[in-house]
Image (cartoon, rainbow, N blue to C red):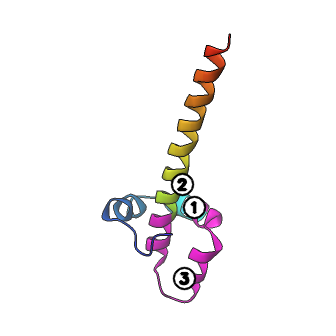
Amino acid sequence: MRKTPSDEYLEKARLLGKEETERLLSRTRSKLIRRLENEKMTALEVVAIQLEIEDEDLNEWRERMTEISKKSKGGK
């Protein structure tokens, strides 16, 4: 897990509204929440890292779905 967010994701986090920020924080992994609670990171930094994690997960999911789609088309 990243220790610091990238500038790109910090900017994305800054642009989020209160509700979007709350939703991201509600999905945040416990390790990041502990960093927030221990004041090792700000809420903005935690949200930025969570955004990055979710983008990476989404990209991996898309790749898997593309492979599944190719296999199912090739088998017919």
Residue ID for mark 2: 54
Labels in figure, total: 3
In this view, the residue farthest toward the front is 75
Q: CA distance from mark 3 to mark 2?
A: 18 Å
Q: Residue at x 62, y 69 (%)?
A: 29
Q: Residue at x 55, y 89 (%)?
A: 38
Instruction: Tell me the quadrant of the picture where the C terminus can be found.
Output: top right
Q: Is residue 27 magenta?
A: yes
Q: Which residues are magenta?
A: 23-49
**Which label belongs to residue 61?**
none
Asked if marks 3 and 2 touch (Cβ < 8 Å), the reply is no
**Which label belongs to residue 35?**
3
Examine the image and state in which quarter residue 22 appears.
bottom right
Residue ID for mark 1: 24
Asked if marks 2 and 1 touch (Cβ < 8 Å), the reply is yes
The residue nearer to you, when weighing 41 against 23, is: 41
Q: Residues within 10 Å of mark 3 (few under 14, many from 20)?
A: some
Left or right: residue 56 compared with residue 70: left
Q: Earlier in the sequence, mark 2 or mark 1?
A: 1
Q: Residues within 10 Å of mark 2 (few under 14, many from 20)?
A: some
Amino acid type of the residue tagged 3 in the rendering: Arg
